[in-house]
Amino acid sequence: MKLRFPLKEFQQMETPFYYYDMSLLDATIKAIKKEIKDLPYEVHYAVKANGNPTILKAIAAHGLGVDLVSGGEIAAALEAGFKPSGMVYSGVGKTDREIIQGLEAGIYSFNVESIPELMVINQLAQERGLVAPVSIRVNPDIDAHTHRYITTGTAEDKFGINIEMLAAAVQTANSLPAIHLRGLHFHVGSQITQMKPFAMLCESVNTLLDYFDRHDISFEIINVGGGLGIDYDMPDVNRIPDFQHFFDTFRRNLKLREGQELHFELGRSIVAQCGSLIARVVYVKENRNKKFVILDAGMTDLIRPALYEAHHVIQNLTSQDTASDTYDVVGPICESSDVFGKDERLPVSHRGDIFALRSAGAYGESMASQYNMRRLPGTYFDE
Ligand code: LLP
């Protein structure tokens, strides 16, 4: 089903802005809830994907938990109505102030990424007469075969604790007076479209659980992070990711222990397809061998193409022209990487046409900047 954009309204609006299809967001979350309803599974929405307050409120209303990475995100999640009992907090560099913020909010778990961090959390909790719930983030050394900038689970990455150091970390956690060790945390990477890395992760977790069983150590939860990818090439065909296949992979491969819960931290797969960046053509320009469509949106509004060589489907929503032409679609920023698409086949385009960059709901608005002293993009919520 093709997304129908309210073009008439777009034409009255100042561009660029993010358009959010809230009914698609709703349908996406319902699809997740349907898959996990009879399972001891909990999904935490990764706020970093999109922290817009309206989006957060809509997700909170469904009762999902949240995965947070900063004090700012803790505050935004509380403000949006997420319950502290569903909050997990990751990050290799949590500051004292942020840890205190998490402790005072009473979050469900700190995903701890190093022994020094564990020590600091213990001390800060002890000083306040609190006990900090934590999960230890394990680096499973799995190559998710995704873009080199968004792989996080290999041994060379800065994230988590290496498997060979895990037993010692668990022992330390269990010996600290103000730490309550809830479980183990993993995350192998992002935009993963094959189930193989997730199945490999399940194998690693099984091996670790067997090991800890032998040492009489058990965990309340296993948190396998996020990473489920979306279809950037066909956003209208695959509007909702294949959550059934994803959760089935864990259900079939992971041997959870009696009473153990499985937690997930999904970001992109929840919000990517419901958002599009809407922009206007400022100029159509012709150089010797090339035609350029110059938009009023640039890498400051959507940095993924410039940063990760990512491609978002580009549509001219205005032009009814059946004739087409080949354009490089670029932004106005003074950087040569400010390109959304090269050699794009599009209807003949004109100044003033409205363009949509699809699948931009995740890591779009949340990564926008004001470089070149630009305004941040606006928003439009379609109920
Ligand atoms: N949990 C942890 C510990 C993470 O580091 C991440 C994402 C997630 C969960 C959520 O992953 P997701 O389900 O969204 O794949 N800016 C990049 C993506 C960075 C992902 C960072 N970590 C992009 O635009 O592709």
Image (cartoon, grey):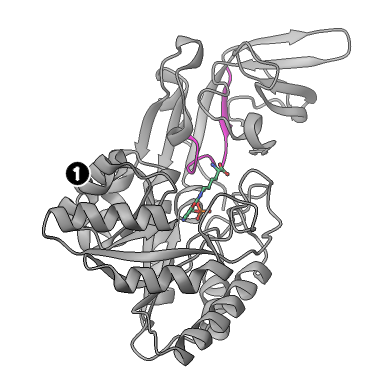
Q: Residue furthest right?
A: 289
Residue at x-position 45% and y-position 90%: 213
- Res. 26 visible in picture: no
Report the front residue among 272 and 42: 42
Q: Is residue 360 magenta?
A: yes
Q: Is residue 87 visible?
A: yes
Q: Determine the residue positioned at 73% across, 8% down.
A: 285
Judged by its main secondary structure, the magenta piece is: loop
Residue 311 in percent (x, y) is at 67, 38
Q: x and y percent of residue 64 in the render?
A: 31, 62
**Camera-side residue: 351 or 51?**
51
- Amino acid found under the numbered disc labelled 1: Glu
Q: Which residues are magenta?
A: 353-364
Q: Residue at x 56, y 66 (%)?
A: 242
Question: Residue at coordinates 63% horizontally, 24% vertically from top-left?
Answer: 319
Residue 371 in magenta stretch? no
Location of mark 1 (residue) = 79
Note whether 277 is above or below 219 in the view shown: above
Quadrant location, the C terminus: top left
Q: Quadrant of residue 324?
A: top right
Q: Say whether residue 227 is left or right of residue 127.
A: right
Q: Nearer the viewer, residue 278 or 204?
A: 204
Q: Position of residue 100 (x, y in %)?
A: 21, 47
